[in-house]
Image (cartoon, helix red, strand yellow):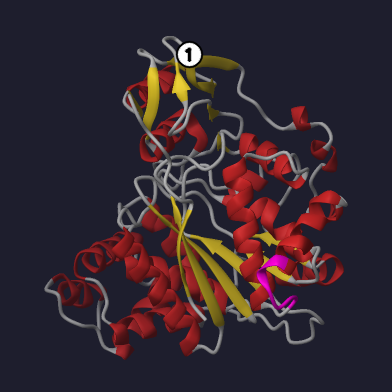
Protein backbone atom coordinates (compact mmCIF):
# COMPACT_ATOMS: atom_id res chain seq x y z
CA UNK A 1 0.00 0.00 0.00
CA UNK A 2 1.03 3.65 -0.40
CA UNK A 3 0.21 6.81 1.50
CA UNK A 4 -1.44 8.31 -1.59
CA UNK A 5 -3.85 5.36 -1.87
CA UNK A 6 -4.89 5.72 1.75
CA UNK A 7 -5.23 9.52 1.50
CA UNK A 8 -7.48 9.15 -1.52
CA UNK A 9 -9.55 6.51 0.24
CA UNK A 10 -10.15 8.66 3.30
CA UNK A 11 -10.65 11.74 1.12
CA UNK A 12 -13.67 9.99 -0.36
CA UNK A 13 -15.00 9.25 3.12
CA UNK A 14 -14.20 5.53 3.06
CA UNK A 15 -13.06 3.57 6.09
CA UNK A 16 -9.48 2.40 6.53
CA UNK A 17 -8.74 -1.20 7.51
CA UNK A 18 -6.80 -2.19 10.59
CA UNK A 19 -3.76 -3.14 8.52
CA UNK A 20 -3.88 0.13 6.61
CA UNK A 21 -4.01 2.21 9.78
CA UNK A 22 -1.22 0.28 11.48
CA UNK A 23 0.97 0.56 8.39
CA UNK A 24 0.28 4.29 8.08
CA UNK A 25 1.16 5.06 11.72
CA UNK A 26 4.27 2.88 11.56
CA UNK A 27 5.41 4.35 8.25
CA UNK A 28 4.89 7.92 9.45
CA UNK A 29 6.79 7.20 12.66
CA UNK A 30 9.81 5.86 10.78
CA UNK A 31 9.72 8.60 8.14
CA UNK A 32 8.52 6.55 5.17
CA UNK A 33 5.36 8.65 5.05
CA UNK A 34 6.26 12.34 4.88
CA UNK A 35 4.88 15.27 6.84
CA UNK A 36 3.07 16.63 3.79
CA UNK A 37 1.43 13.28 3.13
CA UNK A 38 0.30 12.90 6.73
CA UNK A 39 -0.92 16.51 6.66
CA UNK A 40 -3.24 15.56 3.79
CA UNK A 41 -4.46 12.52 5.75
CA UNK A 42 -5.11 14.62 8.84
CA UNK A 43 -7.24 17.03 6.82
CA UNK A 44 -9.19 14.10 5.33
CA UNK A 45 -9.79 12.76 8.85
CA UNK A 46 -10.74 16.26 10.04
CA UNK A 47 -13.41 16.38 7.33
CA UNK A 48 -14.68 12.78 7.36
CA UNK A 49 -13.74 11.56 10.85
CA UNK A 50 -12.93 8.03 12.00
CA UNK A 51 -15.56 5.45 12.86
CA UNK A 52 -15.41 3.53 16.16
CA UNK A 53 -13.37 0.68 14.70
CA UNK A 54 -10.92 3.02 12.97
CA UNK A 55 -10.50 5.13 16.13
CA UNK A 56 -9.80 2.07 18.28
CA UNK A 57 -7.10 0.85 15.90
CA UNK A 58 -5.66 4.34 15.33
CA UNK A 59 -5.30 4.87 19.11
CA UNK A 60 -3.82 1.41 19.65
CA UNK A 61 -1.35 1.84 16.78
CA UNK A 62 -0.18 5.15 18.24
CA UNK A 63 -0.01 3.67 21.75
CA UNK A 64 2.27 0.88 20.52
CA UNK A 65 4.37 3.01 18.18
CA UNK A 66 7.02 3.04 20.89
CA UNK A 67 7.72 2.15 24.49
CA UNK A 68 4.94 1.51 27.04
CA UNK A 69 5.77 2.39 30.66
CA UNK A 70 5.41 0.04 33.62
CA UNK A 71 4.66 1.49 37.04
CA UNK A 72 3.39 -1.72 38.61
CA UNK A 73 6.07 -1.47 41.35
CA UNK A 74 5.02 2.04 42.43
CA UNK A 75 3.47 1.81 45.88
CA UNK A 76 0.72 4.39 45.27
CA UNK A 77 -2.19 4.87 42.89
CA UNK A 78 -0.79 6.14 39.58
CA UNK A 79 -3.01 8.88 38.16
CA UNK A 80 -2.78 11.70 35.65
CA UNK A 81 -4.83 14.65 34.46
CA UNK A 82 -5.21 16.16 31.03
CA UNK A 83 -6.86 19.30 29.70
CA UNK A 84 -8.07 19.62 26.12
CA UNK A 85 -6.64 23.13 26.07
CA UNK A 86 -7.77 26.61 26.89
CA UNK A 87 -6.62 30.19 27.31
CA UNK A 88 -4.92 30.88 30.63
CA UNK A 89 -5.30 27.23 31.62
CA UNK A 90 -2.40 26.65 33.98
CA UNK A 91 -4.31 24.25 36.26
CA UNK A 92 -1.96 21.27 35.80
CA UNK A 93 0.90 23.16 37.43
CA UNK A 94 -0.65 23.73 40.88
CA UNK A 95 -2.91 20.67 40.68
CA UNK A 96 -0.17 18.06 40.26
CA UNK A 97 1.82 18.87 43.43
CA UNK A 98 -1.37 19.28 45.47
CA UNK A 99 -2.63 15.81 44.51
CA UNK A 100 0.82 14.20 44.73
CA UNK A 101 1.20 15.62 48.26
CA UNK A 102 -1.91 13.59 49.17
CA UNK A 103 -0.18 10.30 48.32
CA UNK A 104 -0.81 9.90 44.57
CA UNK A 105 1.97 9.16 42.07
CA UNK A 106 1.62 11.43 39.04
CA UNK A 107 3.74 10.75 35.92
CA UNK A 108 2.36 13.85 34.21
CA UNK A 109 3.25 13.98 30.55
CA UNK A 110 2.08 17.22 29.03
CA UNK A 111 2.18 18.89 25.64
CA UNK A 112 3.15 22.15 24.05
CA UNK A 113 0.80 24.89 22.95
CA UNK A 114 -1.66 24.09 20.19
CA UNK A 115 -2.98 27.01 18.16
CA UNK A 116 -4.30 29.72 20.48
CA UNK A 117 -4.05 27.52 23.60
CA UNK A 118 -1.06 27.43 25.90
CA UNK A 119 1.06 24.36 26.62
CA UNK A 120 2.12 23.15 30.06
CA UNK A 121 5.62 22.28 28.83
CA UNK A 122 6.17 25.77 27.43
CA UNK A 123 5.09 27.27 30.75
CA UNK A 124 7.32 25.01 32.83
CA UNK A 125 10.31 25.70 30.59
CA UNK A 126 10.02 29.40 31.40
CA UNK A 127 11.48 28.44 34.80
CA UNK A 128 15.25 28.99 34.35
CA UNK A 129 16.99 25.66 33.84
CA UNK A 130 13.86 23.53 34.03
CA UNK A 131 13.94 20.64 31.58
CA UNK A 132 10.93 18.65 30.45
CA UNK A 133 12.99 16.37 28.19
CA UNK A 134 13.73 13.34 30.35
CA UNK A 135 14.88 9.91 29.28
CA UNK A 136 12.79 7.02 30.67
CA UNK A 137 15.32 6.15 33.35
CA UNK A 138 15.45 9.69 34.74
CA UNK A 139 11.66 10.00 34.44
CA UNK A 140 11.24 6.89 36.59
CA UNK A 141 13.83 8.04 39.13
CA UNK A 142 12.09 11.36 39.71
CA UNK A 143 8.65 9.74 39.96
CA UNK A 144 9.84 7.25 42.56
CA UNK A 145 11.73 9.83 44.63
CA UNK A 146 9.14 12.63 44.63
CA UNK A 147 5.86 11.05 43.51
CA UNK A 148 5.60 13.60 40.71
CA UNK A 149 7.30 14.27 37.40
CA UNK A 150 6.34 17.01 34.94
CA UNK A 151 7.70 16.15 31.52
CA UNK A 152 7.08 15.75 27.83
CA UNK A 153 7.08 12.63 25.77
CA UNK A 154 10.42 10.90 25.49
CA UNK A 155 11.78 9.96 22.08
CA UNK A 156 10.59 6.40 22.65
CA UNK A 157 7.14 6.97 24.16
CA UNK A 158 4.31 7.22 21.60
CA UNK A 159 6.61 8.75 18.96
CA UNK A 160 3.76 8.75 16.45
CA UNK A 161 1.82 11.22 18.57
CA UNK A 162 4.87 13.39 19.20
CA UNK A 163 5.15 13.92 15.43
CA UNK A 164 1.41 14.24 14.82
CA UNK A 165 0.93 16.71 17.68
CA UNK A 166 3.15 19.34 16.08
CA UNK A 167 1.77 18.65 12.60
CA UNK A 168 -1.84 19.12 13.71
CA UNK A 169 -0.97 22.48 15.20
CA UNK A 170 0.42 23.78 11.91
CA UNK A 171 -2.21 22.33 9.57
CA UNK A 172 -5.45 23.59 11.13
CA UNK A 173 -6.56 20.09 12.17
CA UNK A 174 -6.48 20.43 15.95
CA UNK A 175 -10.26 20.58 16.70
CA UNK A 176 -11.08 17.04 15.57
CA UNK A 177 -12.65 14.63 18.06
CA UNK A 178 -10.90 11.49 16.76
CA UNK A 179 -7.52 13.25 16.52
CA UNK A 180 -7.83 14.88 19.95
CA UNK A 181 -9.07 11.74 21.70
CA UNK A 182 -6.50 9.41 20.12
CA UNK A 183 -3.67 11.86 20.87
CA UNK A 184 -4.61 12.23 24.52
CA UNK A 185 -5.49 8.63 25.22
CA UNK A 186 -2.53 7.05 23.42
CA UNK A 187 -0.14 9.04 25.63
CA UNK A 188 -2.06 8.44 28.81
CA UNK A 189 -2.58 4.71 28.24
CA UNK A 190 1.16 4.39 27.60
CA UNK A 191 1.70 5.65 31.16
CA UNK A 192 0.25 2.49 32.76
CA UNK A 193 -2.25 4.55 34.76
CA UNK A 194 -4.72 3.41 37.40
CA UNK A 195 -6.94 6.33 36.50
CA UNK A 196 -7.19 9.51 34.46
CA UNK A 197 -9.12 12.74 35.01
CA UNK A 198 -9.93 14.91 31.99
CA UNK A 199 -10.72 18.60 31.87
CA UNK A 200 -12.71 19.00 28.65
CA UNK A 201 -12.99 22.69 27.84
CA UNK A 202 -16.09 24.04 26.10
CA UNK A 203 -16.72 27.55 24.79
CA UNK A 204 -15.32 30.23 22.53
CA UNK A 205 -11.73 29.71 23.65
CA UNK A 206 -11.84 25.90 23.47
CA UNK A 207 -11.44 23.54 20.55
CA UNK A 208 -14.90 22.24 21.38
CA UNK A 209 -17.07 25.34 20.99
CA UNK A 210 -20.43 23.74 21.84
CA UNK A 211 -21.57 21.51 24.67
CA UNK A 212 -22.62 18.60 22.45
CA UNK A 213 -19.16 18.36 20.87
CA UNK A 214 -17.44 18.60 24.24
CA UNK A 215 -19.66 15.90 25.67
CA UNK A 216 -19.01 13.68 22.64
CA UNK A 217 -15.25 14.13 23.06
CA UNK A 218 -15.44 13.33 26.78
CA UNK A 219 -17.58 10.25 26.19
CA UNK A 220 -15.20 9.08 23.46
CA UNK A 221 -12.19 9.28 25.76
CA UNK A 222 -14.01 7.70 28.70
CA UNK A 223 -14.96 4.87 26.34
CA UNK A 224 -11.38 4.41 25.12
CA UNK A 225 -10.25 4.21 28.75
CA UNK A 226 -12.90 1.61 29.59
CA UNK A 227 -11.80 -0.49 26.60
CA UNK A 228 -8.29 -0.52 28.09
CA UNK A 229 -9.45 -1.20 31.69
CA UNK A 230 -8.49 2.32 32.80
CA UNK A 231 -10.88 4.40 34.90
CA UNK A 232 -11.49 7.79 33.29
CA UNK A 233 -13.61 10.66 34.62
CA UNK A 234 -14.18 13.93 32.75
CA UNK A 235 -15.34 17.37 33.81
CA UNK A 236 -16.77 19.72 31.20
CA UNK A 237 -15.58 23.21 32.15
CA UNK A 238 -16.27 26.66 30.72
CA UNK A 239 -13.79 28.40 28.40
CA UNK A 240 -15.64 31.45 27.07
CA UNK A 241 -13.22 33.79 28.85
CA UNK A 242 -9.62 33.19 29.96
CA UNK A 243 -9.05 31.17 33.11
CA UNK A 244 -7.37 33.30 35.73
CA UNK A 245 -5.84 36.70 35.08
CA UNK A 246 -2.66 35.72 33.23
CA UNK A 247 -2.24 34.52 29.65
CA UNK A 248 1.39 33.78 28.83
CA UNK A 249 4.08 31.35 29.90
CA UNK A 250 6.19 32.81 32.71
CA UNK A 251 3.21 34.88 33.89
CA UNK A 252 1.12 31.72 34.25
CA UNK A 253 3.87 30.15 36.35
CA UNK A 254 3.63 33.18 38.65
CA UNK A 255 -0.11 32.70 38.93
CA UNK A 256 0.34 28.96 39.58
CA UNK A 257 2.67 29.77 42.47
CA UNK A 258 -0.02 32.09 43.83
CA UNK A 259 -2.53 29.20 43.75
CA UNK A 260 -0.11 26.98 45.69
CA UNK A 261 0.17 29.76 48.28
CA UNK A 262 -3.61 30.02 48.57
CA UNK A 263 -3.60 33.42 46.87
CA UNK A 264 -4.63 32.51 43.32
CA UNK A 265 -7.67 33.68 41.36
CA UNK A 266 -10.96 32.15 42.44
CA UNK A 267 -11.71 30.52 39.08
CA UNK A 268 -8.32 28.79 38.80
CA UNK A 269 -8.59 27.62 42.39
CA UNK A 270 -12.12 26.27 41.86
CA UNK A 271 -11.16 24.22 38.79
CA UNK A 272 -7.99 22.98 40.49
CA UNK A 273 -9.91 21.81 43.54
CA UNK A 274 -12.66 20.13 41.48
CA UNK A 275 -10.18 18.16 39.37
CA UNK A 276 -8.14 17.31 42.46
CA UNK A 277 -11.23 15.89 44.16
CA UNK A 278 -11.87 13.68 41.13
CA UNK A 279 -8.29 12.41 41.21
CA UNK A 280 -8.35 11.57 44.91
CA UNK A 281 -11.69 9.78 44.57
CA UNK A 282 -10.54 7.88 41.49
CA UNK A 283 -7.35 6.83 43.28
CA UNK A 284 -9.20 5.69 46.39
CA UNK A 285 -7.30 8.13 48.63
CA UNK A 286 -10.61 9.14 50.17
CA UNK A 287 -14.21 8.08 49.72
CA UNK A 288 -16.11 11.38 49.72
CA UNK A 289 -15.82 14.81 48.15
CA UNK A 290 -15.54 16.85 51.34
CA UNK A 291 -12.70 14.74 52.70
CA UNK A 292 -10.90 15.12 49.39
CA UNK A 293 -11.34 18.91 49.47
CA UNK A 294 -10.03 19.02 53.02
CA UNK A 295 -6.92 17.03 52.06
CA UNK A 296 -6.19 19.30 49.10
CA UNK A 297 -6.72 22.45 51.15
CA UNK A 298 -4.33 21.13 53.78
CA UNK A 299 -1.52 20.75 51.21
CA UNK A 300 -1.82 24.49 50.54
CA UNK A 301 -2.22 25.54 54.19
CA UNK A 302 0.80 23.53 55.35
CA UNK A 303 2.92 24.35 52.30
CA UNK A 304 3.44 20.67 51.46
CA UNK A 305 2.29 21.13 47.85
CA UNK A 306 4.62 24.09 47.30
CA UNK A 307 7.48 22.16 48.91
CA UNK A 308 6.84 19.22 46.58
CA UNK A 309 6.81 21.53 43.56
CA UNK A 310 10.16 22.90 44.75
CA UNK A 311 11.60 19.36 44.89
CA UNK A 312 10.41 18.65 41.36
CA UNK A 313 11.91 21.91 40.07
CA UNK A 314 15.26 20.96 41.60
CA UNK A 315 15.09 17.37 40.28
CA UNK A 316 14.37 18.66 36.78
CA UNK A 317 17.21 21.17 36.77
CA UNK A 318 15.24 24.34 37.45
CA UNK A 319 15.95 27.25 39.76
CA UNK A 320 13.72 26.83 42.86
CA UNK A 321 14.29 30.46 43.87
CA UNK A 322 11.50 31.45 41.46
CA UNK A 323 9.07 30.29 44.15
CA UNK A 324 10.18 33.04 46.53
CA UNK A 325 11.36 35.50 43.91
CA UNK A 326 9.10 35.33 40.83
CA UNK A 327 11.07 38.27 39.36
CA UNK A 328 13.61 35.62 38.30
CA UNK A 329 11.09 34.45 35.70
CA UNK A 330 11.35 36.04 32.23
CA UNK A 331 9.31 39.16 31.58
CA UNK A 332 9.11 41.20 28.38
CA UNK A 333 10.43 44.78 28.63
CA UNK A 334 7.54 46.79 27.15
CA UNK A 335 3.95 47.49 28.32
CA UNK A 336 0.74 48.56 26.63
CA UNK A 337 -2.70 49.00 28.20
CA UNK A 338 -5.95 48.16 26.43
CA UNK A 339 -8.54 50.57 27.85
CA UNK A 340 -12.33 50.62 27.98
CA UNK A 341 -13.94 53.01 25.49
CA UNK A 342 -17.20 53.18 27.41
CA UNK A 343 -18.51 52.61 30.91
CA UNK A 344 -20.68 49.63 31.80
CA UNK A 345 -20.56 45.96 32.64
CA UNK A 346 -18.41 43.48 30.75
CA UNK A 347 -20.70 41.06 28.95
CA UNK A 348 -17.98 39.35 26.92
CA UNK A 349 -14.26 38.75 27.41
CA UNK A 350 -13.47 36.63 24.38
CA UNK A 351 -10.97 33.90 25.22
CA UNK A 352 -10.24 33.08 21.57
CA UNK A 353 -9.31 36.64 20.63
CA UNK A 354 -7.14 37.02 23.73
CA UNK A 355 -5.47 33.65 23.11
CA UNK A 356 -4.67 34.45 19.48
CA UNK A 357 -3.42 37.90 20.50
CA UNK A 358 -1.07 36.30 23.04
CA UNK A 359 0.17 33.94 20.33
CA UNK A 360 0.86 36.91 18.05
CA UNK A 361 2.84 38.57 20.82
CA UNK A 362 5.04 35.45 20.84
CA UNK A 363 3.47 33.35 23.62
CA UNK A 364 2.48 30.60 21.15
CA UNK A 365 3.39 29.15 17.77
CA UNK A 366 1.83 29.90 14.41
CA UNK A 367 4.20 27.33 12.82
CA UNK A 368 5.65 24.28 14.51
CA UNK A 369 9.21 25.61 14.12
CA UNK A 370 8.42 28.96 15.79
CA UNK A 371 10.25 29.90 18.99
CA UNK A 372 8.21 30.99 22.01
CA UNK A 373 9.04 34.12 23.99
CA UNK A 374 8.35 33.09 27.61
CA UNK A 375 8.22 36.66 28.88
CA UNK A 376 5.38 38.04 26.78
CA UNK A 377 1.75 37.81 27.80
CA UNK A 378 -1.52 39.47 28.66
CA UNK A 379 -2.79 40.34 32.13
CA UNK A 380 -6.58 40.51 32.09
CA UNK A 381 -8.05 43.14 34.43
CA UNK A 382 -11.76 42.96 33.54
CA UNK A 383 -13.85 39.84 33.03
CA UNK A 384 -17.52 39.04 32.51
CA UNK A 385 -19.69 40.73 35.13
CA UNK A 386 -17.12 43.37 36.11
CA UNK A 387 -18.09 47.05 35.98
CA UNK A 388 -15.62 49.31 34.17
CA UNK A 389 -15.30 53.04 33.56
CA UNK A 390 -14.09 54.91 30.49
CA UNK A 391 -10.29 54.54 30.07
CA UNK A 392 -10.10 51.89 32.77
CA UNK A 393 -7.51 49.24 31.78
CA UNK A 394 -9.06 46.03 30.47
CA UNK A 395 -5.70 44.34 30.01
CA UNK A 396 -1.97 45.02 30.18
CA UNK A 397 0.25 43.56 27.49
CA UNK A 398 3.88 42.62 28.13
CA UNK A 399 5.58 42.62 24.74
CA UNK A 400 9.02 42.70 23.14
CA UNK A 401 8.65 44.22 19.66
CA UNK A 402 6.39 46.85 18.10
CA UNK A 403 5.44 44.70 15.11
CA UNK A 404 4.12 41.95 17.34
CA UNK A 405 2.16 44.45 19.40
CA UNK A 406 0.53 45.88 16.29
CA UNK A 407 -0.44 42.41 15.07
CA UNK A 408 -2.16 41.64 18.38
CA UNK A 409 -4.05 44.91 18.99
CA UNK A 410 -6.84 44.46 16.39
CA UNK A 411 -7.92 41.25 18.13
CA UNK A 412 -7.97 42.91 21.54
CA UNK A 413 -9.95 45.89 20.31
CA UNK A 414 -12.93 43.57 19.83
CA UNK A 415 -12.30 41.11 22.67
CA UNK A 416 -14.35 42.97 25.30
CA UNK A 417 -18.01 43.83 24.89
CA UNK A 418 -19.33 46.32 27.44
CA UNK A 419 -23.03 46.84 27.99
CA UNK A 420 -25.62 47.18 30.70
CA UNK A 421 -25.51 43.63 32.05
CA UNK A 422 -23.33 40.57 32.18
CA UNK A 423 -22.73 37.59 34.43
CA UNK A 424 -20.41 34.58 34.06
CA UNK A 425 -21.96 31.14 33.79
CA UNK A 426 -20.92 28.14 35.89
CA UNK A 427 -17.30 27.04 35.61
CA UNK A 428 -18.11 23.34 35.92
CA UNK A 429 -20.82 22.36 33.48
CA UNK A 430 -21.07 18.57 33.68
CA UNK A 431 -19.30 15.37 34.73
CA UNK A 432 -18.93 12.20 32.66
CA UNK A 433 -17.47 8.93 33.85
CA UNK A 434 -17.69 6.26 36.52
Horizontal and vertical percent for residue 349?
40, 33
Query: Viewer-proximal residue, 1 or 358?
Result: 358
- Say whether residue 289 is magenta: yes
Query: Viewer-proximal residue, 399 or 293?
Result: 293
Horizontal and vertical percent for residue 32?
37, 72
Give me the residue at 24% from left, 71% from top: 49
Q: Which residue is mark 1?
A: 392
| Quadrant of the drawing holding the N terminus | bottom left
Q: Secondary structure at mark 1?
A: loop
Horizontal and vertical percent for residue 410?
32, 22
Is 319 situated left or right of 161 in this image? right
Give me the residue at 61% from left, 78% from top: 195
All told, the count of numbered labels is 1
Give me the residue at 76% from left, 27% from top: 327
Is 269 situated left or right of 56 in this image? right
Give the residues drawn in magenta, as a range. Answer: 285-290
Horizontal and vertical percent for residue 263?
73, 38
What kind of secondary structure does the magenta stretch mostly adopt? loop
| Residue closest to the far left | 12
Amino acid sequence: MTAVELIEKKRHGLGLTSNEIRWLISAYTDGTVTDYQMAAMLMAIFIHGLNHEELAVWTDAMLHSGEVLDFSDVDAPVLDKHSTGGVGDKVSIPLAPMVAACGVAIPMMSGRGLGHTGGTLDKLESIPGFTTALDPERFNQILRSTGLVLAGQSETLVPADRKLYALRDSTGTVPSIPLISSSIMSKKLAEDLDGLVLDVKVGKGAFMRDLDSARQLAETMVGIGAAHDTKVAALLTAMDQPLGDEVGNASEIRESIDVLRGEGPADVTEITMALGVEMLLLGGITGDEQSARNLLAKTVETGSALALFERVIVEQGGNPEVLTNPALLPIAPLRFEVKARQAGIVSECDALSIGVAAMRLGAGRERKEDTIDPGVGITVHAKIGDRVEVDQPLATLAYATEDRLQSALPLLDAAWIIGEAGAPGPLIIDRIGP
